[in-house]
Image (cartoon, coloured by chain):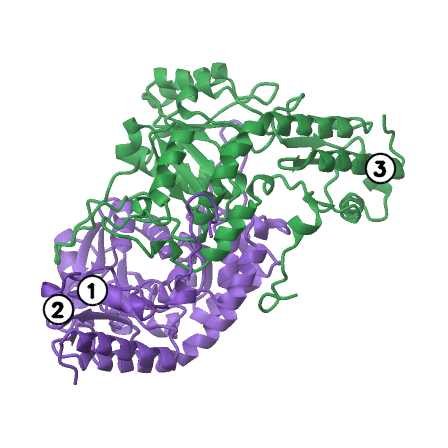
Chain colours: A purple, B green
Amino acid sequence: MKCAGSIETRDVEELYINIDPIQAGGRLTPEALKAVIAYADGYSVCDNCLKPFRLDYIKKPPVAEFHEELAEWLNMDQVRMVPGARRGFQAVASSLVEKGDPVILTSLSHYTEFVALEQSGGVTREIPNDDHNHITAENAAETLERVSREFGRSPSLLFVEHADYQYGNIHEVREIAKVAHQYDVPVLLNGAYSVGVMPVDGKALGVDFVVGSGHKSMAAPAPSGLVASTEEYAGKVFRTTQAKGDITGRTFGIKEVEMMGCTLMGVTLMGMMASFPAVKERVLHWDHEVENSNKFAEAMLSIEGTEIESDSPRQHTLTRINTIGSFDEVAKTHKKRGYFLTKALKKRGITGVIAGSTRVWKYNTYGLTDAQIQYLGEAFREIAEDNGLNVG
Amino acid sequence: MKCAGSIETRDVEELYINIDPIQAGGRLTPEALKAVIAYADGYSVCDNCLKPFRLDYIKKPPVAEFHEELAEWLNMDQVRMVPGARRGFQAVASSLVEKGDPVILTSLSHYTEFVALEQSGGVTREIPNDDHNHITAENAAETLERVSREFGRSPSLLFVEHADYQYGNIHEVREIAKVAHQYDVPVLLNGAYSVGVMPVDGKALGVDFVVGSGHKSMAAPAPSGLVASTEEYAGKVFRTTQAKGDITGRTFGIKEVEMMGCTLMGVTLMGMMASFPAVKERVLHWDHEVENSNKFAEAMLSIEGTEIESDSPRQHTLTRINTIGSFDEVAKTHKKRGYFLTKALKKRGITGVIAGSTRVWKYNTYGLTDAQIQYLGEAFREIAEDNGLNVG
């Protein structure tokens, strides 16, 4: 079946158990799919846009109400929608970082954090991870001190990951924020792998900004995301335009500079909104997700030569695994080389592992049922056995 | 019917003839709606993302091919997807404009152009429109000269609208670009109201950048859009990241700074792609759309006291109308005041006029069938007659 030209209908989520590291938290809820169909047309949320003509003021559909609930849920003062977490990093960096300013991120920061800071002209310095691939308050303190001395002033901003994209490890954000504030450095929480899957309380973490991703962790279509702020910084990051036409004298109301006015005018926002009740509910069951993540990790560890490079026991569903001593040994002599694994998985209805990967790779078990977790572990164990690996 | 909580299913396009000025060109094609359903999940286009891991390199679905065809169709050298035209303005402004640089736009520029330039720190100067609400090469030349003298250097960038958002007038872009180039000023075409509804040939217009909007004029979900560039500027606007981790030594491949890596990773891109064959076809019938726009304008002009403020005859489907001498006269004494008009329209299955508007307002007839155009004109004439206005 073709959509148009050579576009094939996507059926990955219908036909497979998908353990892709970035896709798990962005699968739509049934409510979101309904909203997507109803609000698919371009400017679909603008039917009842009245003065002051800004997305977050729209009452029908209840966009304004959603903004309020979302800020409350994150325990932050204000929130805005953005086309992806990266656009949240961009908005904050562009507001707080001047060319040449020192800015701090971590050795586990996502490339979009680097790019946002590159765009603002900031000079980036990483907080090194410790031997357990954790970003610690101790290393943050050392880095803050080192960078402050190097530049003769405090950094303008510090980015820290709640759960990082490489290991899915949870970092001591609260302690890091405390240290950063001693240097008067505002802290942005990269919650791309936390907001929408696990509980996030901005005030309890003590951060100044929370950035989340709709398509990564909030069961929403792409590109979607959010940037939340404390009252202290909201006036800066959500400042309204001061532009004025020199000939016409036109001014542009309360459009916000970093948001460029409105952001998600249709299907993306409506997907986020429709999933929101289910997302609020699902973060309450994070413990069970972590339990399942550990169950699958145990199954993988029962295959001799396999190592989990992430924290063990797992505290997140995103996991980095090392199969150099197991599946990669098979690949060395298998006629299909590394592809034997992905092919064997596909045969068993499992997808999401990069084709050919048998060395160090990532998976995400988020949202799988207990039965799927069980099946998944058995499938890997079977493939291992079929290929002569020792399975405990 | 509820989607979730208090979200009602949107049925505007199913139940009404919608003449909303910004929504007409963004209604999905049936092909796009199918693609939206198939690709609604978050990172849905990333199933087969391989090295070098960038959106515009994905072969399945045929994202790479789409980029090539799109650039060719616009007669530009390179194109990238962005979350709305405004993000295209932002990318170009951020690349070419330094703080304090003079930049030129027009008295009919959209607020998002101002905001993009405000964000980059540019100092904006408007080209005044002439008495017919046109931006002319003559006024552009005068402005370029005036601003160059004021700042002691040429402006960094000039934004010009193909069809402006206020009147839907078509401006002499080719001649303006020619003048700008005499001052070595690169020209960005704001094609939010042209790309996807009427033919646009970047090279023939002589512009350096073409920006288009998916949700405004390319039958795509929001937020979506494109920024196209000539080879001359592509290296600058689509420059790849130079970021490097100072501790880890990490670099980030060929991710582009202004795109922040990937942009539309799911439903928005797929909607644009699926609509593209139909969009390519529909721009060939622009003459007929304009004919219909004129037919409806004539019906409106037959209501005594009504004036078309846009060019007459119409050359676009977006039109600014003045009904101060007709419907507003009725509103003065009608017990429903200005709301009588939108209510009477709604009763006849017509929507898209801001509730209460009877003075100066805008509509867009794009995409309506001949029968709908006929019906629309009759409906307005009937309402006029019912309320005691003279109808010719």
Relative to A189, is B303 on the left or the right?
right
Q: Are marks 2 and 1 on the same chain?
A: yes
Could you tell me residue B344's position as x and y percent?
A: 80, 45
For the residues bearing labels 1 and 3, Cβ distance under 8 angstroms: no
Callout 2: SS: helix
Which of the two residues, A148 or B348, is positioned nearer the viewer here?
Answer: B348
Would you name the residue on which mark 3 appears? B382
Which of the two residues, B352 or A372, is positioned nearer the viewer here?
Answer: A372
Residue at 20% across, 79% down: A312
Amino acid carrying label 3: it is Glu
Q: Are marks 1 and 3 on the same chain?
A: no
Marks 2 and 3, Cα distance to the nearest angstrom? 79 Å
Chain containing mark 1: A
Would you name the residue on which mark 1 appears? A340
Residue A254 can be seen, yes or no: no
Could you tell me residue A105's position as x and y percent?
A: 23, 59
Callout 1: SS: helix
